[in-house]
Amino acid sequence: MPVRTAEAQWEGSLQDGKGTMRTGSGAFEGSYSFGSRFEEGPGTNPEELIGAAHAGCFSMALSAGLGRAGHPPNRVHTTARVHIERGDAGFSITRIELDTEAEVPGIDEKAFLEEAEKAKSGCPVSKALAATEITLNARLV
């Protein structure tokens, strides 16, 4: 199996510095700063990239599970909201909310929700983030 890489470079102090993150494939490169991470400043941040990875992984896992169950989806769309909060021990990712909607011909809601729960617990990114609370809102459209 391939090993995926990404890199980041930071220059300067925490609050006044700036950095860039990029994927090894070259598909993404973005700037980040204290403001883009802990405020509403322009640029990306690690939590946003974790959210993108989680949404992508979950969507693929759900599609695979639905296909194995005999109901390949026409479309799965997932949004991940990654919450970062400051506590006594510093900043922590406290929760990830997955919100997904899927167009799946011929499946009933109960079977769909079962597959969505399996994907939530079974996708590799969910497993890697198991120390974080992950919630799921899944619906058929």
Image (tube, rainbow, N blue to C red):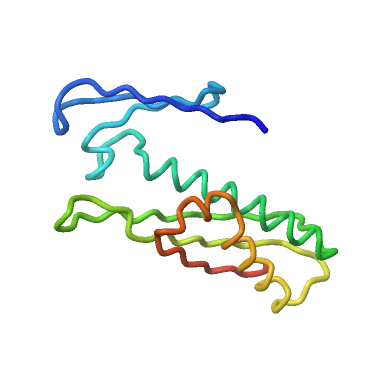
Quarter containing the C terminus:
bottom right
Q: Residue at x 34, y 56 (%)?
A: 83
Q: In this view, does 82 lie to the left or right of 24?
A: left
**Nearer to the camera, 100 or 96:** 96
Q: Residue furthest front?
A: 1
Question: In the rendered image, which quarter is residue 34 located in?
Answer: top left
Q: How many discs appear?
A: 0
Residue 63, placed above or below residue 41: below
Q: Which residue lies furthest to the bottom in this view?
A: 110
Q: Residue at x 76, y 61 (%)?
A: 66
Q: Is residue 125 left or right of residue 20?
A: right
**Nearer to the camera, 54 or 121:** 121
Q: Residue at x 58, y 30 (%)?
A: 3
Q: Residue 9, how many percent across, how many down?
A: 32, 22
Q: In this view, does 73 lie to the left or right of 38?
A: right
Q: Residue 54, how many percent across, how many down?
A: 52, 49
Q: Residue 22, how many percent across, how many down?
A: 44, 25
**Nearer to the camera, 88 or 80:** 88
Q: Residue 55, how many percent across, how many down?
A: 54, 50
Residue 59, placed above or below residue 26: below
Question: In the rendered image, which quarter is residue 4 located in?
Answer: top right
Residue 18, placed above or below residue 95: above
Q: Is residue 68 left or right of residue 37?
A: right
Quarter containing the N terminus:
top right
Q: Which residue is drawn at 67% across and 61% down?
A: 102
